Amino acid sequence: MHPNREHPLYYLDAETLLVATYVWVDDELKALVAQGHKLPKKQKHQKATLAELLTLAIFLLLQGQDLAKGYLAAKTTLKPYFPSLPHLSRFYRVLQKAHGLLAH
């Protein structure tokens, strides 16, 4: 890439970045399942999907936000996109169980 040009992701608005990230994460999870990898079991009473939770984690990291602070803010500001987010500790638990998938 030419050194004077910014990365194209810098020109995306937050909603487009969020949707693009979700589509990518969901496709990757489906591909992993097709390759024989097992996704972590859903937590008891878990309503948000693994794709939604991973999307939110990646989105917050791409935004350069602290995961905990960004997650707590996202519970209110991104509620239309993620209507059933779990408590922060459960969010961490799901991410921890999914860490093996992130290596693929």
Image (cartoon, rainbow, N blue to C red):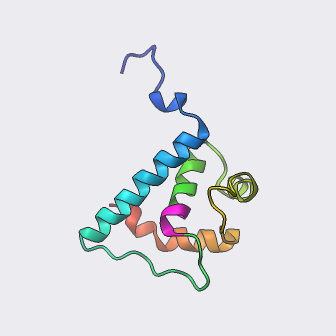
- In the image, residue 85 above or below residue 63: below
Q: Quadrant of the C terminus?
A: bottom left
- In the image, residue 82 above or below residue 9: below
Residue 29 placement (x, y as % from top left): 37, 64
Q: Is residue 29 left or right of residue 4?
A: left
Compare residues 42 and 70 and report the one nearer the observer.
42
Per the rendered image, the range of residues in magenta is 49-53
- In the image, residue 55 above or below residue 9: below
Residue 43 placement (x, y as % from top left): 56, 82
Q: Residue furthest top?
A: 4
Q: Is residue 59 left or right of residue 24?
A: right
Compare residues 23 and 104 and report the one nearer the observer.
23
Q: Is residue 10 magenta?
A: no
Q: Residue furthest left?
A: 35
Q: Name the residue located 68 percent from the left edge and 57 percent from the top edge.
A: 71
Q: Which corner quadrant of the image does residue 74 belong to?
A: bottom right
Residue 82 placement (x, y as % from top left): 63, 60
Look at the magenta stretch and give its main secondary structure.
helix
- In the image, residue 99 above or below residue 3: below
Q: Name the residue located 49 percent from the left edge and 68 percent from the top edge.
A: 50
Q: Residue furthest bottom?
A: 44
Q: Is residue 15 left or right of residue 22?
A: right
Q: Name the residue located 42 percent from the left edge and 56 percent from the top edge.
A: 25
Q: Quadrant of the N terminus?
A: top left
Residue 32 placement (x, y as % from top left): 31, 66
Compare residues 84 and 103 and report the one nearer the observer.
84
Q: Which corner quadrant of the image does residue 102 belong to?
A: bottom left
